[in-house]
Amino acid sequence: MNARRLLAGLALAATSLAAGGLALDRLFPPDLARYQERSTEVVDANGRLLRAFTTPDGKWRMKTGVEDVDPLYLSLLKAYEDRNFDRHPGVDPTAVVRAAGQLIERGRIVSGASTLSMQAARLLDPSQLRPGTRSFTTKLIQSARALQLEWRYSKREVLAIYLTLAPMGGNLEGVRAASFAYFGKEPKQLSAAEAALLVAIPQSPERRRPDRAADRARAARDRVLVRGLEHGIIDQPSYDRAASRPAPDRRLAMPMQAPHLAAWLAGQSPGATVPTTLRFELQAALAQLAAEEHAQFTDRAQIALVIVDNRSGAVVAWQGGSDFFGRAGQVDLVRARRSPGSALKPLIYAMAFDDRMLHPDSLVEDVPVRFRDWLPRNFDRDHQGAVTVRRALQQSLNVPAVLALEKVGPQRFLSTLRTAGVSPGLPPGDSGNSLGLALGSATVSPLEMAGLYAGLANGGSFAPPIVRRDRPAPTPLRLIGQTAAWYVADILADAPLPEGFASLPVALRDRRIAFKTGTSAGFRDAWAAGYSANWTVVAWVGHADGTPRPGQLGRLSALPLVFKAFGRLPAEDNRAAPPPADVVRVASHRDLPPRMRTLAPTVEGPSENRGGPRIAYPPADARIELAAREAVPLTAMGGEGRLRWLVDGRPLDGAKWVPDGPGQARVAVVDEAGRSTSVSVRIVEKR
């Protein structure tokens, strides 16, 4: 009976103790705030660290789990700090008995009984990290908290707390932060010497930090190695090699790839690990290229580069500037909107091709044409007369591009850009109707430019480039037909190279690259964009504050960067893509349908043509009866210099016009100042 009462009492006591423990656990849960307040990390497509940031309290505290460290480190850690970690419930009774016996026998503490779980509990509580807080009471609290952690979390989770918070000297906390700072690498492949050092430092982090006390750090490391040898974790040859290694005597810089992008993304997700689409090797190669080229600029111009994988729409490399810690170096020039100069012309022509109003072999008159009070001129201030659209785009002639935009419509062009994910910036007071869009009056960013050219590479399907792997990719929208996109690629891939490009043959041999350059007014922005089947590369060169760079054209400053960047990309098939089925091939513009043969301006009427030529014959809205092959004499009054006549945009040789047959026609005359006028007439067959 007494035994039965004793057992019942013990059961009641155990139940009460468990209930009390459960109540205390609910009332005083472990505070994981320090563990959860970690460094923001920006990583590449494979999880490799690009850049990390200190926590708000100034610590390098990087999330570290069991899977992030070398198994050798874990074995040495447990052998040195807590041999029974995998078996005890948070407190090691064997260690407690051993430590108490040594204290009684020798009258002093010989070895502690602190487990890794107890250390994890102490590291979670900032109040227990201050000097002079180690006492019997704090040990009891740590023991209770350790039991609580083990009750709530798995062994791996408890160990992750220690691995993330272990003090490593200075503002370094955790194994990953220390591994980067002392060895320049992730702790997944630590050597025996490196692993032992990271085990030793937390016991006395300031006295053993290698950058200030390399000798003490080495001695502490060797004691860990001895323990590893005694427990069979390492063999004698491994011990000898590790013990012969010097301890590091300085801290290394943390990884700093794609610093501009990393800073932007870190601001979006503080304290998180941000997964990007970048590829570490390509990013490092691009950064090296930018550094090499930046060193060649006597004016220290900045370089922005962005590379997109056309197959996925993912950004694989992002160089926001050349000198991150220099003057204005932290301006992310990949996202900065600048005047594109002529770099948007391919999109204008693509839309005109898609409308079937133009063809690469259409003829356009590159002559001075005045659009109201604006007289656009080519960059060299010269004009080439009648040229094909193909040549006009390859030579980046301005008047033909403005004429093409006039046909497409500025508002429609802007709307297409916006649908493609671009947010063009317009000058003050510009409602979006300006034909200056063809020459760079609307600003775009290199990132947006890369999205546009990647859309051309993808046959006219556009989507903003993606850079975060944890965000859904936008659905591509077909804004231009495949045939129009093919025409543009065919024109740009066959464009003649500027003089001096013989030193860049490798990238051109390896792949077929369609490219276009641009230079903004005042030489403030030099652009180049190129695309192959797999990759799109955009380069911008200039000063962040817009300081002019006289004489520095896109083809001189930016285009070499594009080709050199292609030279560092993985190889690909360099064959031209087969043309779509409805591609039209002709021997000359005369073989095209009438409305596609020529590109003519929508010229101003006589009332707006101040000081310009006036058509004397034929009069406006005239009905002219003609016999077959009969000529219409053309006469005009006023204007400056030699007059040029055009019918439906087709230039005439002289002042006589032989109509092709009956129908409506528009007759225009242009003087050397670019002023023009036109009239509509109807030709009917004489009976």
Image (spheres, grey):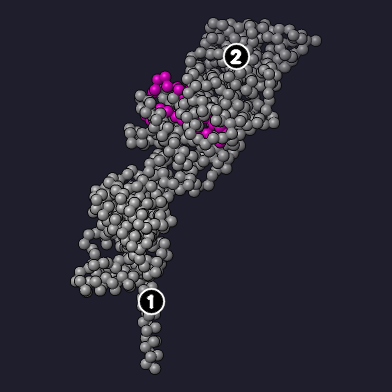
Q: Is residue 132 magenta?
A: no
Q: Residue furthest right?
A: 687
Outermost residue on the front side: it is: 237
Q: Amino acid at mark 1?
A: Ala
Task: Check disc 2: other Cα within 10 Å, few if <14, some if 14-19, many if 20+.
Answer: some
Residue 453 picture location, percent across and down: 54, 32
Q: Amino acid at mark 2?
A: Ala
Which marked residue is nearer to the observer: mark 1 or mark 2? 1
Q: Is residue 121 visible?
A: no
**Residue 616 placement (x, y as % from top left):** 62, 7
Q: Secondary structure at mark 1?
A: helix
Measured along the vertical axis of the image, is residue 198 above or below residue 351? below
Residue 303 visible in the picture: yes
Rendering coords of residue 499 (x, y %) = 49, 18
Q: Secondary structure at mark 2?
A: strand
Q: Which residue is mark 2?
A: 386
Quarter-wise, where is residue 141 in the image? bottom left
Q: Quadrant of the C terminus?
A: top right
Residue drawn where x is 63% and y is 12% of the image: 651
Disc 1 target residue: 18
Q: Is residue 178 above or below residue 527?
A: below
Residue 542 falls within the magenta-colored stretch: yes
Q: Is residue 160 left or right of residue 646?
A: left
> Separation of disc 1 and disc 2 at Cα?
95 Å
Q: Residues within 10 Å of mark 1 (few under 14, many from 20)?
A: few
Q: Which residues are magenta?
A: 529-556
Near-viewer residue (240 or 673): 240
Q: Residue furthest bottom?
A: 1
The mark tally for this picture is 2
